[in-house]
Amino acid sequence: MRENTVTIRRPDDWHLHLRDGALLRAVTPSSSFLFGRVMIMPNLVPPVTTVEKARVYRQRVLQAAVKSNPQFQPLMGLYLTDNTTVEEIDRVAMSTEVAAVKLYPAGATTNSASGVTSITKVMPVLERMALKNIPLMVHGEVVDADIDIFDREAVFIDRVLKPLRKRLPELRIVLEHVTTKQGVDFVQEQTDTMAATLTMHHLVINRNALLVGGIKPHNYCLPVAKREEHRLALVQAATGGDPHFFFGSDSAPHLQADKESACGCAGCFTAGHALLYLAEVFYQAEALEKLEGFVSRHGASFYGVSENTDTVSLCRSEEDDNSELSAGDISSEEGMIKAFATPGVSLRWNYIL
Ligand code: NCD
Ligand code: ZN
């Protein structure tokens, strides 16, 4: 008999979009009831490009958080642009609130218009980051029109990441939301200055979930889900215990109307139930004992922070509880936000709170 309960250190979410205004107020409780550290993405409009903007945004996040979890601690990511200065990096080094800098290739994803147009333009800033030991989080996709969208990550690794690792091996880099076998293989071979986050949704769906039986906008995110062979490589990476890999939900809420549209936004809202789906992934892989490393320890170790000290417990029901599938939907003052839910993937776990 496999265990049907599990107790782990409180988890962290190393890649999270909380937005601002009404959406921020609506979605923040879905993360703040559970997670310890959350790494907040800076792709607001306008983006969070300075330590001062990040500090003020962090205050708004804290105001929106539930008060029942005193361990909740937002860490801010700073948005890297072609115009980021080395002086700003020095301010990041002095800050206790900004923990990393995020590189979006310009045009790669939601709100990335101000992103980096060429890595050579930001090289002095990256060198300063290496010197000051500030981690770089990377959205690893090229945006060239002639590259197939399903190949964007693999091409980014060859064209951008490999040369960058050669040039600045001491720069700590997190390849965010890895979606390919090429990504997994590359990261596994690297030293401990390189790591990767994995989302829950890329562990449970492949690209069929986007396109079979009608287009499924709530399964659309960037990087886009790939073939089954890639999903299996991601599951192996997550459940295999390798400390290069840790959890970043990439929970990316959009209003239902913006997802269910002729030009639907990229992003899956997973914050409230990602851990429950993850527990099932690890259970199915007969690796429940590896869940804690993936969600609660490897990320803390990479970022050089202490592990959370309290615990959370989950239990599994033998019943496939479909009523839970819409349990993560929430309403905001601006409209509904639909949670990621996909038929065929059971939600059998629940929190013991
Ligand atoms: C994210 C968003 O909506 O901000 N979307 C997504 O599909 N993941 C941006 C990102 O992380 O790429
Ligand atoms: Zn993201």
Image: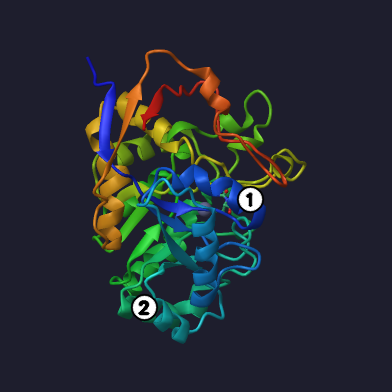
Q: What residue lies at 45% left-to-right and 48% top-to-bottom? A: 32
Percent x, y for residue 51? 49, 75
Residue at horizontal 32 percent and vertical 53 percent from the top:
187
Coordinates of residue 270 in the picture (x, y in percent) = 51, 40
Q: Which residue in the structure is indicated by mark 1?
A: 23
Q: Quadrant of residue 200?
A: top left
Q: Name the spot of residue 24 as percent of width and height, x first.
A: 59, 53
Of residue 74 and residue 158, the one placed in the foreground of this image is 74
Q: CA distance from mark 2 to mark 1?
A: 30 Å
Disc 2 packing (10 Å; few <14; some 14–19; many ≥20): many
Residue type for callout 2: Ala
Whole-percent x, y for residue 167 in the image = 34, 74
Residue depicted at x 57% and y 30%: 209
- Name above or below for residue 335 compared with residue 82: above
Q: Is residue 310 left or right of residue 111?
A: left
> Farthest residue toward the right?
262
Quarter of the view holding residue 137: bottom left
**Residue at the front extreme of this rendering:** 67
Can residue 350 be seen here? The reply is yes
Point out the image quarter for the C terminus.
top left
Q: In terms of secondary structure, where does tag 1 sit?
A: helix
Front residue of 37 and 198: 37
| Residue to which mark 2 is pinned | 93
Which callout, 2 or 1, points to the residue nearer the camera?
A: 1
- Taking depth in this image into account, of 323 and 117 the one nearest to the observer is 323
Q: Amino acid at mark 1?
A: Leu
